[in-house]
Image: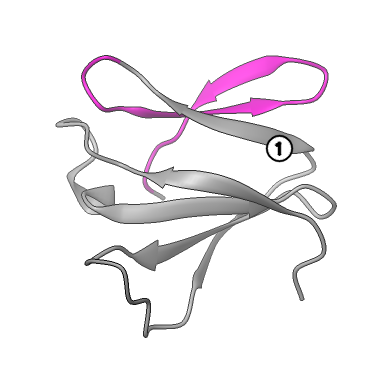
Amino acid sequence: GHRAITGGAANRGPGQTALKGIYVFADWCSGRIWTIPHNGPAVNQPETLRADTNQNITSFGESENGELYLVTSPGHVYRVLAS
């Protein structure tokens, strides 16, 4: 289960078409990253586990062109790529 969810963002960047419009979020405790299709205010589909990392993910951010990034403790920045 989820223990400490880090809110994410929907990817809008042109480089990751497999994640286009997909909401990405993480669990700070486990380092797992999930996705949910983002199609309006209602979420009626289960999440998909995308990655199992050993990182404490503290935040998500977006570049000027819509590419998705995540930040880990103690302050590393990674670009989110479709697996």
- Mark 1 residue type: Ile
Quadrant of res 78: top right
| 10 displayed left or right of 79 | left
Please say if 14 is above or below 8: above
**The residue tagged with tag 1: helix, strand or loop?**
strand
The residue carrying mark 1 is 57
Q: Where does residue 69 sit, x and y in percent of width and height?
A: 47, 27
Q: Residues within 10 Å of mark 1 (few under 14, many from 20)?
A: many
Protein image colouring: one colour
In reply to whether residue 26 is colored magenta, the answer given is: no
Tell me which residue sits at (80%, 25%) in the image. Answer: 73
Q: Where does residue 54 sit, x and y in percent of width and height?
A: 80, 43
Tell me which residue sits at (36%, 46%) in the image. Answer: 82
In reply to whether residue 72 is colored magenta, the answer given is: yes
The N terminus sits in image quarter? bottom right
Tell me where the magenta segment starts and ends, as one range: 64-82
Q: Where does residue 74 sit, x and y in percent of width and height?
A: 82, 18
Q: Where does residue 37 sit, x and y in percent of width and height?
A: 31, 67
Quadrant of res 9: top left
The residue positioned farthest toward the front in the image shown: 41
Please say if 11 is above or below 75: below
| 39 displayed left or right of 51 | left
The front one of 13 and 59 is: 59
| 43 displayed left or right of 5 | left
Please say if 55 is above or below 5: above
Tell me which residue sits at (62%, 32%) in the image. Answer: 59
The front one of 4 and 29 is: 4
> What is the tally of numbered marks visible in this picture?
1
Tell me which residue sits at (31%, 27%) in the image. Answer: 67
